[in-house]
Image (cartoon, helix red, strand yellow):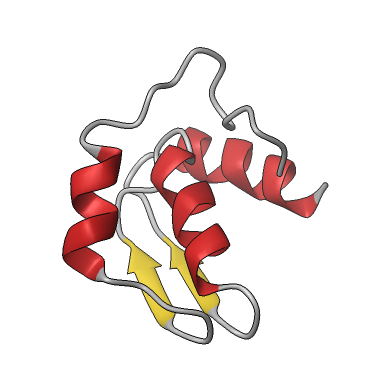
Amino acid sequence: MTESTAEAGHQPVMLAEVLQGLSLRPGDNVIDATIGGGGHAIAMLRAITPGGRLLGLDADPAAIARCRQCFAA
């Protein structure tokens, strides 16, 4: 996925605070239970690479479809 997020114009909320609280490192496994526009997921993937894995979930099937398409690229 590129610098843009899956949802055009999406701005992740409190991104720095979330990343600081999670203290992610390369190789970590993480779950984004509200993947939404993909902004937090992108940042988490950068923090856990190489070797980490991200599981993205959302109650909105459209959000999952958008992220699935963007992350596959």
Give the answer, above or below, for where 2 lies relative to 17: above
Which residue occupies the foreground of this view, 61 or 57?
Answer: 57
Give the answer, above or below, for where 16 lies relative to 31: above
Left or right of residue 31: residue 5: right
Q: Residue at x 27, y 71 (%)?
A: 23
Q: Residue at x 45, y 38 (%)?
A: 39
Residue 33: which quarter of the image?
bottom left
Which residue occupies the foreground of this view, 16 or 6?
Answer: 16
Which residue occupies the foreground of this view, 9 or 20?
Answer: 20
Q: Residue at x 22, y 58 (%)?
A: 20
Left or right of residue 60: residue 42: right
Which residue occupies the foreground of this view, 54 or 25?
Answer: 25
Percent position of residue 1, x then y:
71, 44
Give the answer, above or below, for where 24 lies relative to 13: below
Q: Residue at x 18, y 47 (%)?
A: 17
State the count of labels: 0
Percent position of residue 25, x then y:
42, 78
Residue at the limit of the structure toward the top, as seen here: 9
Left or right of residue 6: residue 37: left
Percent position of residue 10, x then y:
44, 20
